[in-house]
Structure formats: structure tokens, C-alpha cells
Amino acid sequence: MSTNPAIQVRGLVKKYGDKTAVAGIDLTVEQGEIFALLGPNGAGKTTTVEILEGYRSANSGEIKVLGFDPATKGSAAQKWRNKIGIVLQSANDAADLTVIETVSHFANYFDNPKGTHHVINAVGLSDKENSKTRQLSGGQRRRLDVALGIIGSPELLFLDEPTTGFDPEARRSFWDLIRTLKSEGTTILLTTHYLDEAQELADRVGVINNGKIIEIAPPTTLGGRNNAPAKVIWLENGVNKEILTTNPTDEVIKLNKQFNGPIPELQVLRPNLEEIYLRMIGELK
Ligand code: ATP
């Protein structure tokens, strides 16, 4: 564990009039970590992330992002902003600029930008470099948003539902891009509605509902998933058999002896992240 977390939040509260959108959140994201915030619509994810980005103000709470309070203004804030990359939930406005002009323009805002062509290539838009952004499809525009988020070589990258509108292939190549950024040391805070995305990318997942964190854990152990009963399935005399057990290893050893060798069509299934998540937010019994 690093002594200086990339993000440290204690008791974060945000109200809109009478509505409490964020009801006292504690959160630590370590340097170099990919952290995914999961939660249903209206849970408070975007509010939380936009407070961390300095775009909204909190009612109360202690917040440190790269050691800095995002509510601070002035030249120190400018320096801090240089180390942060942001991909907001809403896609950027379509414009008459081309992809390469847009990315080059953004690069000028940063002290240490990545190469324009390198970034356009990394998000899979090389063949659209000279297209006007208003001519891009929804998914392509979202890729451009991601390019603008990473052009400044951020230490910390915020991604609010980054792959909405991506086709499956684009999502896979986006995941590769995120893994590359992680391997280069970038810390990433991601919100997503895609459980497979959280499973693929996140070191830890925070589940948020009604403005509160329900649990923070790696995707493999969230909601006691690793200890949940497993289903052992096999074929016996042409009939599918299954048993629910907390000790699938013993069951498999027993079957292995029974069959005196390989167990026909053996499967051992744990509840997937989606089932666990839906149970946690009360949508599945
Ligand atoms: P989604 O998955 O739909 O993006 P979310 O988890 O990001 O949802 P938020 O956008 O943070 O949720 O919203 C949390 C709550 O705060 C919701 O009830 C929402 O209606 C409310 N809210 C968000 N922004 C505002 C605002 N500017 N003014 C008033 N209420 C707001």
C-alpha cells in the first residue's frame, strides 16, 4: 500500500436542495490502481466523481486528489489539473474541427502531452483523423472523448461510463488501452454499468447505492462471491446432473473417483459479478 493515495475521501456529502445525492462516502484509491464505481442510475457516482474533478462542490467532507483539495482555485489548481485526465459522461459537442485538429488543440493545454498520432491510434481513430468530429458515429465520438482524456499524460484518469456506445470490438481494444495506461503507472477511477468491464479492469470495485458505499472489494471477492456456493454440473448416463455446494473440490474428487477418470462435461460455476451486484443493490433475491 502506498503512503500517498491518489484519492482520499472522508465523509463526503452532497445535497441538491432537499435531496441528498451523496450521503457520507469514504473512499481511498491507491496510486496505480484501477478502481471502478458501480451503482444503479442516480446512485451518486457522477456527483462523486465530478466533486473529485473539481467540477462540483461538496457540502462537507475531506477530499484529497493527488494531495490537493479539488475545490481550491488559482494557479495551484491549474498545475493540479495538468496531472488529471477527464472523460465526462456526456460526449463532447460535435464541431467543424477534424479529429486531429481537436486532439492537437487539446494537447496545447498540457505541459507534457502525448503524441497526437499516438493517442488517435491508441483509441482506434487513425482512419478518421481528417474527419470532422460532427461526422463521427456516437461510438467514434466517445473514442475521441477518451483521446482527449489521455492526451495530457495524466497521472490520474477519471472515466465516467467510458465505453457507452462502443461495439464489442471497440470495448476490447479500449480495455487493452486502459491496461497499457495502468502498466505505465496511471491511476484510473472508472464508473461503469458494465459488470464485465469492472471484472476485466478493476483492481477494486466500490458499489454505491442511494449515495452510500455498500462495499469495496476486488471483483473476485465482492459480496462474498469467492465463498458463495458453487454449482457443480456434469453428465451422467446421458442426464445433466447438478449440485450446489460450498466445497466444489470435494465434490469433484468424489465424482472423479465415481467415474474412475475424467468427469463428462464437468463445469464448476460461481455466481458471476452481475448476480452478486444485483443482489447487493436489492434487485435480485
Ligand atoms: P447514472 O448512472 O444515471 O449516471 P449516477 O450514479 O451518476 O447515475 P448522479 O448523477 O450522481 O447519479 O445523481 C445522484 C442523484 O442526484 C440523483 O437522484 C440525481 O437526480 C441527483 N442530481 C444529480 N445532479 C443534480 C443536479 N445538478 N441537481 C439536482 N439533482 C441532481
Image (cartoon, rainbow, N blue to C red):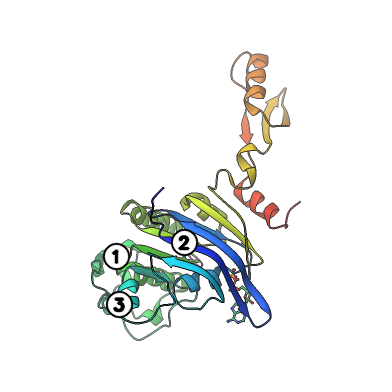
Give how far across and how far down residue 235 sits, in percent. Answer: 68, 27
Kind of element beneath mark 3: helix
Give how far across and how far down residue 214 sits, in percent. Answer: 64, 56
User: Label for residue 8?
Assistant: 2
Contact check, label 1 and label 2, Cβ < 8 Å: no
Q: Identify the residue under disc 3.
A: 106
User: Where are the magenta residues, as a range?
Assistant: 164-168
Query: Which residue occupies the extreme bottom position in the image?
Result: 96
Q: Earlier in the sequence, mark 1 or mark 2?
A: 2
Residue shown at 56%/56% (left/top)? Answer: 206
Query: Which residue occupies the extreme right position in the image?
Result: 285
Mostly what secondary structure, the magenta segment? Answer: loop
Residue shown at 39%/64% (left/top)? Answer: 157
Q: Amino acid at mark 1?
A: Ser
Of circles 1 and 2, the one toward us is 2
Q: Is 7 on the left or on the right of 275, as rendered?
A: left
Confirm whether the magenta stretch covers residue 167: yes
Kind of element beneath mark 2: strand
Kind of element beneath mark 1: loop
Q: Earlier in the sequence, mark 3 or mark 1?
A: 3
